[in-house]
Amino acid sequence: MDPVQYLKYIVGLLIVLGLIALITLLARRFGMVPRASRDPSAPKRLAVSDVMSIDAKRRLVLVKRDDREHLLLLGPEHDVVVERNISVNENAEQGDVKNA
């Protein structure tokens, strides 16, 4: 293959990538991509408290919602709720006992 053919392939690839980027920008601009909106003045109700890697594919995630925490095991095949409705006050008391 001569260098002219390589140049044609590279130009074609750049054109295709440019079209994909243009379509993505237009889709975002005209509201075709759903977005989660939240009132900035409202208090935050959801947060990730802690993340721990178990191995290369699985993680334990502690998610806080209002005054409760939920322990999730996230993996490639499925996700499992390990423990739910953990009171934040109970965690603070247990932390104090461990540190004493």
Image: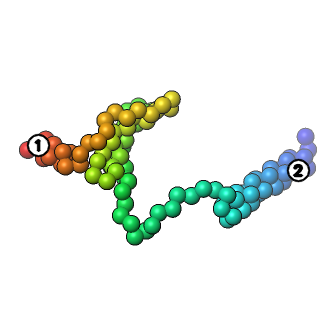
Does dot 2 land on a helix, a strand or a loop?
Answer: helix
User: Left of 5 or right of it: where is 22?
Assistant: left
Looking at the rendered structure, the kind of residue marked 1 is Val
Q: Residue at x 30, y 45 (%)?
A: 69
Q: Residue furthest bottom?
A: 41
The percent position of residue 3, horizontal first and vertical second, equals 88, 48
Q: Is residue 14 visible?
A: no
**Disc 2 to disc 1, C-alpha distance:** 69 Å
User: Left of 36 or right of it: where is 30?
Assistant: right
Q: Residue furthest top?
A: 77
Q: Residue at x 44, y 34 (%)?
A: 79
> Which sits in the foreground, 50 or 1?
50
Q: To which residue does mark 2 refer? A: 8
Quadrant housing the C terminus: top left
The percent position of residue 87, horizontal first and vertical second, equals 23, 45
Q: Is residue 38 visible?
A: yes
> Which sits in the foreground, 47 or 3?
47
Q: Residue at x 78, y 56 (%)?
A: 19
> Which sits in the foreground, 86 or 20?
86
Badge 2 crowding class, 10 Å Cα cut-off, few under 14, some 14 to 19, many 20 or more, is: few
User: Left of 94 or right of it: where is 57?
Assistant: right
Looking at the rendered structure, the kind of residue marked 2 is Lys
Check if mark 2's residue and mark 1's residue have beta carbons within 8 Å: no
Q: To which residue does mark 1 refer? A: 97
- In this picture, is 39 found above or below 94? below
The percent position of residue 14, horizontal first and vertical second, equals 79, 54
Badge 1 crowding class, 10 Å Cα cut-off, few under 14, some 14 to 19, many 20 or more, is: few
